[in-house]
Amino acid sequence: MATAVPYLGVIEGFFGASWAWQERAAYPAFLGAHGYSFYVYAPKDEPFLRKRWNEPFPAERLNHLKDLCAAFKAAGLHFGVGLSPYEAYRAYGPEARTALRAKVEVLNSLHVDILCVLFDDMRGDLPNLAETQIRILGDIRDVSTAPRIIFCPTYYSYDPIIERCFGAMPQNYLEDLGKGLDDSIGLFWTGEKVMSSAYPAEHLSEVAERIRRKPFLWDNYPVNDSKRASPFIFLRAFENRGAHLTELLSGHAVNPMKQPWLSQIPLASLALNYSQGSSYDRDLVSMMCINQVCGEELGKLIGEDLALFNDVGGAALSEEQRRHLRARYEPRIENPICREIVTWLNGGYEFDPACLTD
């Protein structure tokens, strides 16, 4: 029996080189055709939303954002931006508050539907962390015209890797956020791990109790920016994101791969994982999405090579396997999907050591 699909979207939030503007331009039509409702622009290499957040956008970049926002709205989708005021909570005084207000007002000029405030992947073992972040979110909410604000806390999972990289989570951090943040503000959560393979109902219910709201899932599949995941191209369909999540989440955002065209293969399956319920077959849906995105001829080749991309990975390919892939995809390099495969074979999409969690 078909089940309801939650508020689904894509958040471009990975480390490494981000997508090109012309690649993003293909996503309004694609997302609209596959059950998604929003896209959030939040590349980790976007300096004017992250480490240089308090500097003005260059005019050309702001114009690109305006055009992209208009394209998503024209397709009937919501458009969002992820603002990461890097470690502003370390010294949040009048100067930082004024700069933050100015940046939010610039984002207001885009008429964004979603403003994500992202304090992930930053040092967090600080006194009064929750209190300061609550104050920052309150100041942003007072200025922002975005209908929806979603906050990513510094500790966004129980995965011990976060504390190893960014320090111990302050006592009662999540509970303090839950009590102090306005009820209208969503809160991102990646699950039991940074890269979770499933989302047990008991876990999500326990998190919801601590943060006093349903979590907004930040799903790190099929993203491949970590040191361990960078050699792979994850093309299999989603699994374990079915009907049990619909009533437990306020939304579901997917972090895609560094390869925008190949990302469309697994992304095409997410709404089906929800809507098909117990009849969902991951292997069948994987092949269906490969053929749907790539076309039957290219889809047949990629289906035959699926294990090399998804399981073996570029670093472990034998010379024979590498020659096999080159012979199949280099003659088709004008196709952007094949071009991404050849770039991957040539050592492109390298791991960005700024990505500390794995």
Image: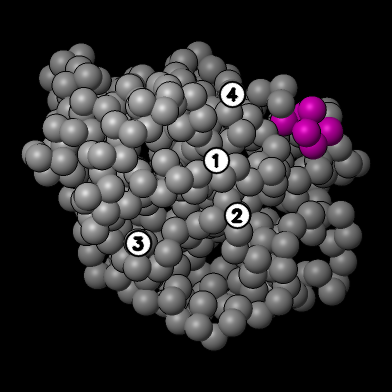
* 325 and 229: which is toward the camera: 325
Q: Quadrant of residue 256?
A: top left
Main SS, magenta region, reads helix
Question: Which label sits on residue 225?
Answer: 1
Q: Nearer the N terminus, badge 2 or badge 1? A: 2
In the image, residue 154 above or below residue 317: below
- The alpha-carbon separation of the residues under discs 1 and 3 comes to 18 Å
In the depicted view, which residue is nearer to us: 65 or 147? Answer: 65
- Residue denoted by label 3: 23
Magenta stretch bounds: 162-167
Relative to residue 314, is residue 135 drawn left or right?
Answer: right
Residue 194 is situated, as x and y percent measured from the top left of the image, at 59, 29
Decide if residue 227 is on the left or right side of residue 258.
right
Mark 3 to mark 2: distance in Å? 17 Å
Q: Position of residue 162 (x, y in %)?
A: 72, 31
- Circle 3 Cα neighbour tier, 10 Å, few/some/many (<14 / 14–19 / ≥20): few
